[in-house]
Image: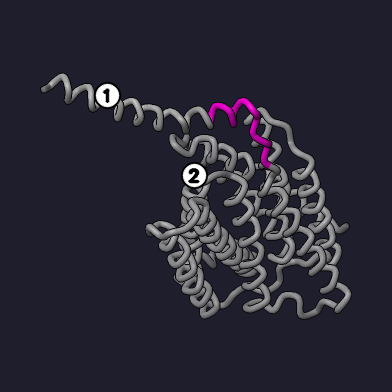
């Protein structure tokens, strides 16, 4: 493992820990969020993520975001005072194994190409359209399970974070080539502001998604983020064109394995209902019927008394 790849993995791991803690705090305090703590944790994760993007390409950094789910669910289980189930451990193992396969296939891919102004504009337009479509559809009153709005909001958040990461790497590459004087260019200054706006939108959308729970929304965000980033890398930056067929097969296998692990982590086994709980539920269902019969029996006596 080269120094650049080691730095990328370490910074991505620390970023995942910060994002995981932020996700747990957001889910636990969704009704009354402590914004200073949430912003601090997400801000620390974002800075570490930017550091990782300085050493590794989108193809390396974004899939490592799945470590957020690996860290978040055990932490969430500890906060909720429950055990991490065997299915969750299998999901964590599959996710880590898939990420290792991706790293082996991609290797020490360093960022070399920045988006030009036309590509930046195209990326922003597509990202905004997807975010508005997903988030707007989630906020409208539509029929379906209650969890679907949370998944749509999480998908919109994943798109926002992926676009923000791609634009961040472009800003870093241009600053590395021309120095901080490059920020005086209107196009790059505007791109920097868009990065801030997309990051804030991703944070707010994630907060809204976690109101529907942690597992499903966080898994959706974890999957959509690298998939959207991969689309940017392949469609606009030409990433992966120099990989051999063997490397592509290993990367695809790793991606599938990581996705399976994410699904296992997001869908933990439900504990069976206790017999006492089922008995109490049956009694609660019978109570309204007994009251109705009592009221019917009282009506004739009431009428007779009135006569």
222 relative to 212, above or below: below
Q: Residue at x 53, y 40 (%)?
A: 26
Mark 2–mark 1 Cα distance, whole angstroms, equals: 46 Å
Residue stretch rendered in magenta on the structure: 270-281
Q: Any mark on residue 165, and which?
A: none
Q: In what quadrant of the picture does the C terminus appear?
A: top left
For the point 72% across and 55% down, the residue is 64
- Of the pair 100 and 282, the residue shown nearer to us: 282
Mark 1 crowdedness (10 Å alpha carbons): few <14, some 14-19, many ≥20: few
What element does badge 2 sit on? helix
The answer to which of 298 and 289 lies nearer the viewer is 298
User: Residue 53 versus residue 28: which sits nearer the camera?
Assistant: 28
Q: Tell me, yes or no, if residue 184 can be seen here.
A: no
Name the residue beneath numbered marker 1. Answer: 298
Picture coordinates of residue 147, whole percent (x, y): 52, 51
Apparent side of residue 135 relative to residue 94 in the rendered image (left or right): left
- Please give the name of the residue rendered at 70% of the width and 45% of the height, measured from the top-left corner: 14
Up-down: is 35 above or below 162? Answer: above
- The residue under label 2 is 211
């Amino acid at each position: 493992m080269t120094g650049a790849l080691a730095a990328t993995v370490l910074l991505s791991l620390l970023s995942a820990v910060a994002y995981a803690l932020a996700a747990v705090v957001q889910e636990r305090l969704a009704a009354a969020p402590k914004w200073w703590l949430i912003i601090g944790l997400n801000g620390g994760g974002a800075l570490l993520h930017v550091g990782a993007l300085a050493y590794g390409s989108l193809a390396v950094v974004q899939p490592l975001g799945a470590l957020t789910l690996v860290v978040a669910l055990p932490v969430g289980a500890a906060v909720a005072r429950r055990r991490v189930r065997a299915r969750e451990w299998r999901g964590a193992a599959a996710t880590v194994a898939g990420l290792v396969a991706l790293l082996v296939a991609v290797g020490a891919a360093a960022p070399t190409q920045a988006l030009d102004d036309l590509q930046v504009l195209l990326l922003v337009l597509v990202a905004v359209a997807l975010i508005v479509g997903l988030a707007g559809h989630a906020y409208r009153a539509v029929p379906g399970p209650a969890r679907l709005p949370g998944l749509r909001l999480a998908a919109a958040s994943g798109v926002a974070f992926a676009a923000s990461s791609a634009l961040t790497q472009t800003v870093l590459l241009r600053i590395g080539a021309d120095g901080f004087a490059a920020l005086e260019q209107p196009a790059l200054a505007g791109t920097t502001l868009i990065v801030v706006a997309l990051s804030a939108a991703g944070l707010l959308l994630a907060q809204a998604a976690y109101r529907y729970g942690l597992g499903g929304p966080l898994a959706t965000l974890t999957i959509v983020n690298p998939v959207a980033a991969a689309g940017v890398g392949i469609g606009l930056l030409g990433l992966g064109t120099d990989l051999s067929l063997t490397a592509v097969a290993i990367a695809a296998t790793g991606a599938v394995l990581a996705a399976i692990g994410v699904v296992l982590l997001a869908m933990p086994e439900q504990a069976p209902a206790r017999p006492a709980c089922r008995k109490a539920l049956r009694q609660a269902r019978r109570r309204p019927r007994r009251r109705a019969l009592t009221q019917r029996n009282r009506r004739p006596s009431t009428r007779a008394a009135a006569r």
